[in-house]
């Protein structure tokens, strides 16, 4: 992760200071529960909060201790004892390091999800705005990159809205699944700590207790979470790729906003490049790169090993920070997108009406022609129109076999663009029926 692709809110969540504050809260809440159960003195729990809460932990001091003890949680607990004093002997009673580390990671991923969902709402808002503005902005649809039949730019945006609505539901589900707490001891049996401690810590941190942990929270939860981030990243890339294609000089139907004073190329002053959506494509690759390691983390040895640890120290911040940045960037790109309706119309007319070929095909079959014969009639005229840049309707009107089945007036009705748009309202109702 580099600052170029990071927003301060998400970066702060993954800072060492933020992590240590969460660690302290886990330990202090556990002390509260143990004090309530009579395991440790209530005064000790109160003093731990009083002397540790609000402390700016000395990161360099913790790093210094860790260089000697070679253990990050012990280094933190040693530093905490320097603040808390004698009551520190009651901290970490019956806990194991993973209780602190895994519960902290759950808190961080839960809070990261909240930021990601905010970004997703911005994307949805921008998509809906453009969908409504261009509901009937007609453009040519493309399959295999080749002109197919008419659609609207609003439908393109509506498709994005529907896709990100699904992404939001997936992320909400993944967030719920990852928001679990484990304070169950060395191998998850609660041998040296009562389950009520875990329940109290979970409640205070707005988590759910893990039903059965080992020494760690099962990593299938994390795999599902990062896989969901990968799907969201792919949806970002799909829209970014669509915009990049639409901005190509030969298409020029939509483009990223180009600000006054902006420069597109160090060599060619005329350039207006789709740099933001290209950047989004790259960021999507980075997020997806975190998915496979998360899947591989599921298979740990027995009750725990630490092969997952180094992976998660990297992919936790990287995936969420990059995706957070990408969501906000995509929202801005869509909101400020420049749409060229005139160019859309030019492209629609580029092949002389060939986008109506299926209508003619179906009309001929309705008049008694076999599908095979109808296809041949339409295709021979379509290919001539394409290769010689002629008007498709004119060619059909001169084809005796076609005219014998379709009169001139009936043929003309088959070239009405409005026909292709008659169900746009139905689609919009389906997409936006929930607001």
Image (cartoon, rainbow, N blue to C red):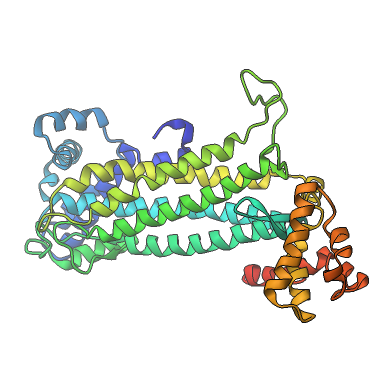
**Picture layout, residue 327 above or below residue 190:** above
* Res. 203 in view: yes
Task: Please say if 112 is above or below 70.
Answer: below
- Residue extending furthest left? 191
Residue at the location (55% across, 45% down)?
A: 328
In the rendered view of the protein, which quadrant contains the C terminus? Answer: bottom right
Q: Residue 326: give x, y in percent of width and height.
A: 51, 44
Query: Where is residue 308 shown, x and y percent of the image?
Result: 21, 48
Looking at the rendered structure, the number of numbered marks drawn on it comes to: 0
Is any part of residue 426 visible from this angle? no
**Residue at the image point whose x is 22% and y is 69% from the top:** 211
Image point (44%, 42%), residue name: 322
Q: Quadrant of the N terminus?
A: top left
Q: Nearer the viewer, residue 273 or 88?
A: 273
> What percent of the width, then of the height, locates residue 126?
64, 52
Q: Residue furthest right?
A: 409
| Near-viewer residue (123 or 271) | 271
For this view, does 335 lie left or right of residue 299?
right
Residue 395, how many percent across, how many down?
85, 59
412 versus 320 height, above or below: below
Q: Nearer the viewer, residue 31 or 154?
A: 154
Occupied quadrant, residue 213: bottom left
């Amino acid at each position: 992760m580099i600052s170029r692709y990071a927003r301060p809110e998400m970066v702060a969540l993954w800072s060492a200071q933020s992590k240590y504050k969460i660690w302290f809260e886990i330990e202090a809440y556990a002390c509260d529960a143990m004090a309530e159960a009579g395991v440790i003195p209530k005064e000790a729990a109160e003093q731990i909060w009083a002397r540790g809460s609000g402390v700016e932990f000395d990161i360099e001091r913790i790093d210094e201790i860790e260089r000697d003890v070679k253990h990050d949680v012990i280094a933190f607990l040693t530093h905490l004892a320097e603040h808390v004093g004698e009551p520190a002997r009651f901290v970490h009673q019956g806990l194991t390091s993973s209780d602190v580390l895994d519960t902290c990671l759950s808190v961080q991923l839960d809070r990261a999800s909240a930021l990601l969902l905010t970004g997703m709402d911005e994307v949805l808002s921008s998509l809906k705005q453009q969908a409504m503005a261009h509901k009937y902005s007609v453009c040519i649809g493309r399959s295999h990159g080749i002109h197919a039949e008419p659609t609207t730019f609003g439908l393109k945006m509506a498709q994005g809205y529907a896709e990100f609505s699904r992404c939001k539901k997936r992320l909400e589900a993944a967030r719920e699944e990852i928001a679990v707490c484990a304070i169950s001891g060395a191998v998850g049996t609660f041998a040296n700590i009562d389950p009520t401690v875990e329940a109290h810590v979970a409640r205070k941190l707005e988590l759910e207790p893990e039903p059965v942990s080992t020494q760690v929270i099962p990593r299938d939860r994390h795999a599902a979470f990062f896989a969901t981030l990968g799907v969201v990243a792919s949806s970002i890339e799909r829209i970014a790729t669509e915009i990049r294609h639409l901005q190509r000089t030969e298409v020029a139907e939509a483009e990223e906003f180009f600000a006054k004073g902006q420069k597109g190329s160090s060599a060619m002053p005329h350039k207006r490049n789709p740099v933001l959506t290209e950047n989004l494509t790259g960021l999507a690759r980075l997020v997806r790169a975190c998915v496979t390691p998360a899947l591989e983390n599921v298979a740990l040895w027995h009750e725990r090993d630490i092969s997952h640890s180094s992976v998660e120290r990297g992919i936790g911040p990287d995936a969420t920070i990059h995706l957070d940045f990408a969501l906000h960037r995509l929202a801005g790109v869509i909101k400020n997108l420049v749409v060229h309706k005139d160019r859309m119309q030019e492209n629609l007319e580029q092949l002389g009406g060939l986008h109506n070929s299926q209508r003619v095909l179906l009309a001929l079959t309705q008049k008694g022609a076999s599908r095979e014969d109808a296809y041949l009639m339409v295709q021979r005229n379509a290919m001539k129109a394409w290769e010689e840049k002629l008007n498709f309707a004119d060619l059909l009107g001169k084809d005796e076999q076609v005219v014998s089945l379709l009169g001139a007036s009936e043929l003309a009705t088959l070239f009405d663009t409005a026909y292709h748009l008659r169900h746009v309202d139905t689609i919009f109702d389906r997409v936006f029926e929930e607001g």
